[in-house]
Image (cartoon, rainbow, N blue to C red):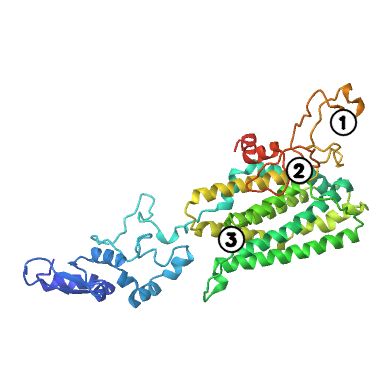
Amino acid sequence: MSAPGGQQASEMGRHANPDIRRAFAEFQDQDTPAKCNKVRCLHCGFVRAKNTTRQIEHLHQCEAYLASSEAQAWRAQNGDERAMAAGVTPRAVLNGQQPNPNLQINRRGPNIKRGRDGQQLAPNVGGMPPPVAPSLTAHLLAVCQPAFTRATQQPFLSHAGCGSLAPGPLTQWLVQDGHYARGFIRFVGQLLAKLRLPQTANSQFHPMYRTMDLLISALNNMRREMSFFEITATKYGLNLSQDPPTPITRALLDLFVSASSTSASLLEGMVVLWGTEHCYRTAWQYASSFSPLSTTSTDGHIVALHQALIPNWTSPAFSKFIDASRALVDELANITTARDGKEEMTRCEEIFRQICWIGERFWPDVNGMGEGDDPPRHAPSIGPMTANMENGMSSGMNGPMQMNGPQINSLPNGVPNGPMNQMNNGPISAQMVSQMNGGEASASGE
């Protein structure tokens, strides 16, 4: 209401917000002199009855004001830099996502009420923790926790940490890891081809440029690791064979192809990159948690494990790379503009389950003495054959061949091919496909 006396007008002047006064022009409607004063927004021309709270609400929604230099100065002078440091966007206060710190409720007397313990009843807004952004990687690790544990805590790793691993399983794993490394190079190259780099003034802060930098770093790291394998094998006398990829290694290579295809998103590919490397680090950290049975072993492969291989995958530099990958995956997930975010989340879950399924079987099978299983733990068991086999395989058999588990080292002829999330580059048994697409969830209760 307009002030009928000078004292009331003076009190209103003491509490007036100068920013509001600059944004509005106050006037009195000559047609209705007995009614409230009115104000007109100097930015958009909106007219309303004078009311400081309503005027502030109008400025929150006035696009002309928000684009003005006055609004920019307000953001610079009223703590927006502190808000950004706390995770609040610059326009969060003005668009209603955060409370306006200048919006005060006038009351009689200062707000100094205290409780029985002597503390003020008013909340301490400045001490509130900043908002926490959702984490896709934390979600994946939570929903796949049992499978991830199986993938990173295998007997091969415990024997490697104890120093009781036989040379055969180690060299077998090194050969297959070499196939993994070469496939990883092609995979990262395909992810680089997916990037669309906009023109920007500060490219080092843009997520696409930072993704490019991380992928280039991944290529350099893998190239150094390939040289590291060659030097380690020569230095410690490890005889590496020329064996082709096993079906499990082929499944991992097919996952690389699928996650970098044109039908897959960049986020899916980055989940594969982070997931496989995170499994490696966690697995070798598990191996390093065991104390060697002997500190004076002269076996070349044991010395190589504890002087070169285990330190390589538990080093601070490798952990720094994986932590950066995880942070970037979470950031890409939070800024994704996919039309159906739930569908992409489901695909990421399926991909991470496949990583865990493959990771569990990628480590060579060993028995209680650290020697290779014969037959391997995941090999099929063949049912008994009758005496009709006297004349060889051409004479037939009375019973069908039984396959009681997923295949690791060999697949018999005639096993049907099956897709694994659009991966068609290798023979995969029907039971393996079933476990990847659903059996793992039922087995672990996830």
How many numbered tags mark residues here? Answer: 3
Q: Earlier in the sequence, mark 3 or mark 1?
A: 3
Front-most of residues 378 and 443: 378
**Residue labelled with disc 1:** 393
* Image position of 145 with respect to 313: above or below: above
Q: Earlier in the sequence, mark 1 or mark 2?
A: 2
Q: List x then y, in percent, for residue 93.
A: 37, 64
Q: Which mark is residue 328?
A: 3
Any part of residue 155 in sight: yes
Q: Secondary structure at mark 3?
A: helix
Q: Secondary structure at mark 2?
A: loop
Q: List x then y, in percent, for residue 33.
A: 6, 69
Front-most of residues 342 and 190: 190
Amino acid at pointer 1 = Met
Instruction: Give yes or no for contact between labels 3 and 1 (Cβ–Cβ under 8 Å).
Output: no
Instruction: Give yes or no for contact between labels 2 and 3 (Cβ–Cβ under 8 Å).
Output: no
